[in-house]
Amino acid sequence: MFRGIYKVSLDERGRIAVPVRVREMLRARSNGKVVVTIDPRDRCLLLYALEDWSAVEKELTDLANLKPQARYLQRTLVGHALDVEMDNAGRILLSPPLREYAGLAKRVAVLGQANKLELWDEDALKAHLADAHEQSQAMDDLEGLDGVHL
């Protein structure tokens, strides 16, 4: 399970150094093989261990193609998915289209989300969290999630 937030730098070649704790988990789980794709809701990237991505991809491909929402998710998540392998230094290369989608600049926030990691431009994440916090409806919406106890 991925949790916590880490701050890393994006180098001039478009690589990030995966935080050590996360790196160890990814190596143990998938030999450092990951899949990076775009988030269909927010301007961030999603990073999955290959094993976890395989389960997500199966769910997506099992969706009925007749529904526009299913096609949208398939095009967004599967269509932009990129197989990446960590190098010996624990870095992963993010393609220019993925970096552009998420607006990644120099500083990247890596946010654990249980079965995946979100990769955000650090300033964009701060703004996103501030906006969500300011919206009076944000906490009210959480109360509609049955079975979630904060």
Image (spheres, rainbow, N blue to C red):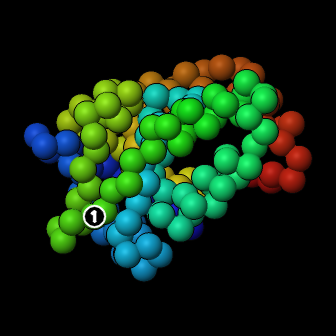
Measuring from the top left, give residue 70's x and y in whole percent: 71, 34
Most distant residue in the bottom direction:
28
46 relative to 54 in the view: left or right: left
Q: Can residue 96 be seen in this view?
A: yes
Count of marks, rendered view: 1
**Residue 122 lies in quadrant:** top left
Identified at 21% across, 66% down, the residue is 87
Expressed as whole percent of the image width and height from the top left, the position of residue 147 reads 87, 53
Secondary structure type for disc 1: loop
Q: Residue at x 55, y 58 (%)?
A: 53
Residue lying furthest front in this view? 66
Q: What residue type is labelled 1?
A: Met
Q: Which of 84 and 131 is in front in this view?
A: 84
- In the displayed structure, 102 sits above or below 148; it is above
Q: Which residue is drawn at 40% across and 43% down?
A: 119
Residue at (38% x, 30% y) in the render = 102
Q: In which quarter of the image is the N terminus?
A: bottom right
Q: Quadrant of residue 138?
A: top right
* Rendered position, 77 above or below 92: above
Task: From the top left corner, tell me how far across and down residue 30 is, in percent.
Answer: 44, 73
Q: Residues within 10 Å of mark 1 (few under 14, many from 20)?
A: many
Which residue is the site of mark 1? 86
Judge left or right: residue 52 versus residue 45. right
Closest to the observer, 125 or 78: 78
Q: Position of residue 125 (x, y in %)?
A: 43, 33
Q: Is residue 139 visible?
A: no
